[in-house]
Amino acid sequence: MNQSTYLVLTFLFAILSMGAHGQTLLKESKNENLKILLISDLNDSYGSVSYSKDVHEVVKRAKEINPDLILCGGDMVAGQKASLTASRLDSMWMAFDRDVLDPIHQLGIPFGFTMGNHDASPSYQLDRAASYKFWSANKYKANLTYVDDTHFPYYFSYIKNNVFFISWDASSAEIPAAVKVWMEKQLALPIASKARARIVLGHLPLYAIVAAKNKKGEVLSEADETFEFLKRNNVDMYISGHQHAYYPATKEKLTLLHAGCLGGGPRPILGHSAAAKKAYAIVEIPKRKGIKKIKITGFEPANHRHILLESLPYSVNGFNGSVYKWSSK
């Protein structure tokens, strides 16, 4: 028996020994078509307990889109302001539940997410406490098949249709070393290495693509080193929010999907003359060939019109590096 066969058999035995959860993991480790609805940056003004019509429209449309999974790139609420009280923060999360999470839960669609700087900035301990309180009580509504939820809701792993996901804590420019150590171990697991794709979801991006975020602190520190870390650990795609601009990009075969915003403040792409637009996206990974045949389609929420790849710039050059427009070819 070779080492690869031994690891697979060991993995299967471990899963079966976990009972019902193990059976679910086994089911989700099978190749199936995967349709993902990607939303991000839902928040409006600081302390808001309401959401824009675009947020409501896309949540309503989720039933028609019928995705297998919804991913949110962070900034689910509008925190990160010192004057916000614990009571107000709780009200903000209750509004998120009312307008976003619970309607999705009622549809039975799993909801993967990552913490944004307006959700749980490490510099705002009240925000961190409120987000932890909310997600501890509402974890069941995420309806995810967890591989490791030890550090939920800040960083955790899950699987859907044999695509392995990691949500890590990129709510600030610094990814703690402990998170990277945990992540390396996760991606070395048989369930991750045997998956047909590995996707990481984090709020802050690697590289700047809008003028307002074209500076230190608004992107991940040591972007090139983090990029190499992702590549070294066989990550296929990094999905980020924060910049409020939709731009599916690539860099050395790693897909960098910048999610647009549904909340306030869409931004134009750096060096591009087109007007800023709110956006959401649908990501489709087919049962066969997986990530090699991925399809990414952006939409404007107001009219659900396609955002054509041809309308996006060939490349974006920020202060810390360049990225290039993704192509389905």
Image (tube, rainbow, N blue to C red):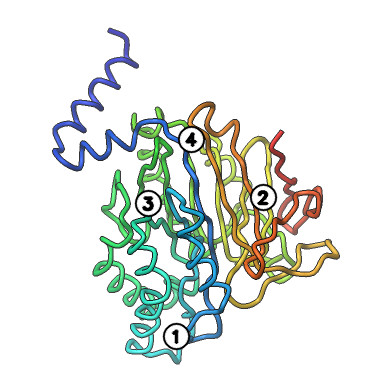
Q: Which residue is mark 2?
A: 248
Per the image, label 2 sits on a secondary structure element best described as: strand
Task: Name which residue type carries label 4.
Answer: Ala
Q: Position of residue 246 (x, y in %)?
A: 67, 59
- Which callout, 1 or 3, points to the residue nearer the camera? 1
Q: How far is disc 1 from disc 3 in space, using C-alphas?
A: 34 Å
Q: Is residue 246 above or below residue 192?
A: below
Identify residue type, mark 3: Ala
Q: Which residue is mark 3?
A: 178
- Whole-angstrom CA distance, mark 2 to mark 1, is 30 Å
CB atoms of marks 4 and 1 within 8 Å? no
* Comes first in the chain, label 2 or label 3: 3
User: Where's the N terminus, which quadrant?
Assistant: top left
Disc 2 crowd rating (10 Å Cα; few below 14, some 14-19, many 20+) is many
Determine whether label 4 and label 3 are within 8 Å by CB.
no
Query: Callout 4: 10 Å neighbours few (<14), some, many (20+)?
Result: many
Q: Nearer the viewer, residue 52 or 10?
A: 52
Q: Residue at x 37, y 90 (%)?
A: 85
Residue at horizontal 16 percent and vertical 41 percent from the top: 20
* N-terminal-most mark, 1 or 3: 1
Query: Going from the N terminus, do you reach mark 4 or mark 2 first?
Result: 4
The C terminus appears in which quarter of the rendering?
A: top right
Residue 157 — which label? none
Using the rendered image of the protein, determine whether residue 216 is visible from the camera's viewpoint.
no
Q: Which mark is residue 49?
A: 1
Crowding at dot 1, Cα within 10 Å, few <14 / some 14-19 / many 20+, comes out as many
Residue 16, horizontal then vertical, whole percent: 17, 31
Distance of label 4 from label 3 (alpha carbons): 23 Å
Does residue 196 sit above or below 148 in this rendering? above
SS at mark 4?
strand
Secondary element at image label 3? helix
In the picture of the structure, the residue carrying the numbered disc 4 is 197
